[in-house]
Structure formats: C-alpha cells, structure tokens
Image: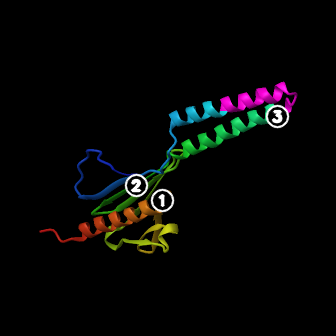
Amino acid sequence: MPDLQPNDDGRHADSQVHLDTVLTPHRSLGQRGLVIIMAVVSTVSFAAGLTFYLIGAWPVVGFLGLDVLLVYIALRANLRHARARERLRLTDEAMVIERTSHRGVSRSVSLQPYWLRVHMDDPVEHSQVWLTSHGRRVAVGSFLGPVQRLILAGELRQALAKMREPRH
C-alpha cells in the first residue's frame, strides 16, 4: 500500500480542493527499531571483542567498535531521510507541489491545472511520474516504489478528470 495520506487541515477555501495528498518515503525502521538493532549489534560486537581480547588479538576490538559506529551512522542517516515529504494539492486555480527535504527546507512549485498532464516513463519498474504544464516538467513521488507511483499517477489523472468535468 502506498504512503499516500490525505491531508485535511480543516481550512475552507473559495476554490474546490480536488486532491490533497502528502507523500512520504517508506522506512521500515523507526526509532524503537534503531535502538533494538543497535543493542543487538553492540552486544554481538562486545562478545566478539571480548573473545578476541582474551586470545590476545586485542587490535580487533577497535575494528569491532568502528563497525558498531558505522552501523549507527548509517541507520541514523536512513531515519533522518524519512522526514522528507511531498505535498500535492490540486485546486481549481493551481497544482501546488510542496517539497520538504529531510533537513526541513521547503520548496514549492505551482502549475496551471487546466493544461496539466500526467506522464509515466516506461518500463513501470524504473518509471517516474511527471507533471507537465506550459513547458514545465516536474517529477513527483520519486522516492515511492513502482506500484505506489502507478497508483499516484492514477489518482492524479482521476482528480484532474474530476476537476475538468463541467459543473451544473
């Protein structure tokens, strides 16, 4: 299932919101998982280090400590990158793509929705979802898996079709 979360901030706007979604990268490891993995890695490294120290191979202990440190740094970087977000908001006036990096830096791109087209590269396994309007081309959901990108493209096309339907 994709990490597509509808966003309901409770505000009332003059224009109708056709799509408001927050995309987040999938990370199977949370803070609790990091603590558990580090406890297991530290325990195994300590036991192995003690064994090597007792048989006289004490320099190996430093390398085992370095391994624990490198595993910790890699897992913390993975956890930090999970904070990245993309918010897609389609209204009658604009398609706004707001990207927030893992560092918290936000950038926003606005596209005219009536000329907006959704494209996907082939093959689907290595695809990107592209939004194009008036010569501007923006990739969205690049951190999603192939199935999630396919679902996202379908939801975007459906929201655009609904927006373009005549209202009576």
Q: Is residue 50 magenta?
A: yes
Nearer to me, 11 or 153: 153
Q: Is residue 162 magenta?
A: no
Q: CA distance from mark 3 to mark 1?
A: 40 Å
- Span of residues in magenta: 42-59
Give the image location of residue 144, x and y in percent.
47, 57
Residue at the location (60% across, 43% down)?
77
Mark on residue 2?
2
Amino acid type, callout 3: Val
Mark on residue 145?
1
Secondary structure, mark 1, is: loop
Mark on residue 60?
3
Q: CA distance from mark 2 to mark 3?
A: 44 Å
Secondary structure, mark 3, is: helix
| Residue at the left extreme of this rendering | 168
Q: Earlier in the sequence, mark 3 or mark 1?
A: 3
User: 64 above or below 165?
Assistant: above
Amino acid type, callout 1: Gly
Q: CA distance from mark 2 to mark 1?
A: 8 Å
Q: Earlier in the sequence, mark 2 or mark 3?
A: 2
Considering the image in quadrants, where does the C terminus appear? bottom left
Amino acid type, callout 2: Pro
